């Protein structure tokens, strides 16, 4: 499963189960309001809304939202992506390379 498939399945699940919002659960666990949670609190937050992450899913999320491997997962980009607001963290490398190439070119030529 890649990040796009995982996000699609998570969006579908959240649309069916809207009693608790992921945002409110994350924010309740984020006492300092930094927009990030340690891995343990991230997992607890997901469990509160009924999502038990498998090891492969946890790795996908960690690779995307904790790229420096410091042990804190930024949840705000995940919430915005799930709301349908594209976030750069979830864009594939190929698309980013193409965007960088386009940025460097004078398109008026």
Image: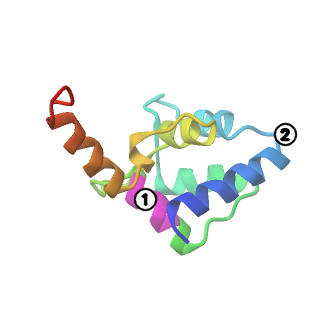
Which corner quadrant holds the N terminus? bottom right
Q: Is residue 29 magenta?
A: no
CA–CA distance between discs 2 and 1? 26 Å
Q: Residue at the front extreme?
A: 109
All told, the count of numbered labels is 2
* Secondary structure state at the residue bearing disc 1: helix
Q: Is residue 17 left or right of residue 85?
A: right
Vertical side of 62 occupied by 95: above or below = above
The quarter holding residue 15 reads top right
Q: Is residue 87 left or right of residue 106?
A: right
> Which colour assignment does the render follow?
rainbow
Q: Which residues are magenta?
A: 58-64
- Using the image, tell me which numbered label, if any, was put on residue 94: none
Residue at 60% across, 54% down: 7
> Magenta stretch mostly in which secondary structure?
helix
- Using the image, tell me which numbered label, if any, was put on residue 62: 1
Q: Is residue 62 magenta?
A: yes
Q: Which one is nearer the viewer's eye here, 59 or 71? A: 59
Residue at 32% across, 56% down: 93
Whole-percent x, y for residue 34 in the image: 43, 31
* Secondary structure state at the residue bearing disc 2: loop
* Residue 49 in sight in this render: no
* Residue 65 in sight in this render: yes
- Using the image, tell me which numbered label, if any, was put on residue 19: 2
Q: Which one is nearer the viewer's eye here, 39 or 87? A: 87
Q: Which one is nearer the viewer's eye here, 55 or 105? A: 105
């Amino acid at each position: 499963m890649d990040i796009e498939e995982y996000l699609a399945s998570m969006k579908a699940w959240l649309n069916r189960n809207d009693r608790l919002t992921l945002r409110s659960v994350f924010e309740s666990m984020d006492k300092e309001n930094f927009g990030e949670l340690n891995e343990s609190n991230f997992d607890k937050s997901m469990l509160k809304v009924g999502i038990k992450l498998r090891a492969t899913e946890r790795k996908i999320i960690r690779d995307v939202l904790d790229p420096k491997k410091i042990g804190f997962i930024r949840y705000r980009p995940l919430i915005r992506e799930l709301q349908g607001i594209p976030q750069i963290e979830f864009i594939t490398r190929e698309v980013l390379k193409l965007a960088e190439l386009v940025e460097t070119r004078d398109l008026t030529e």
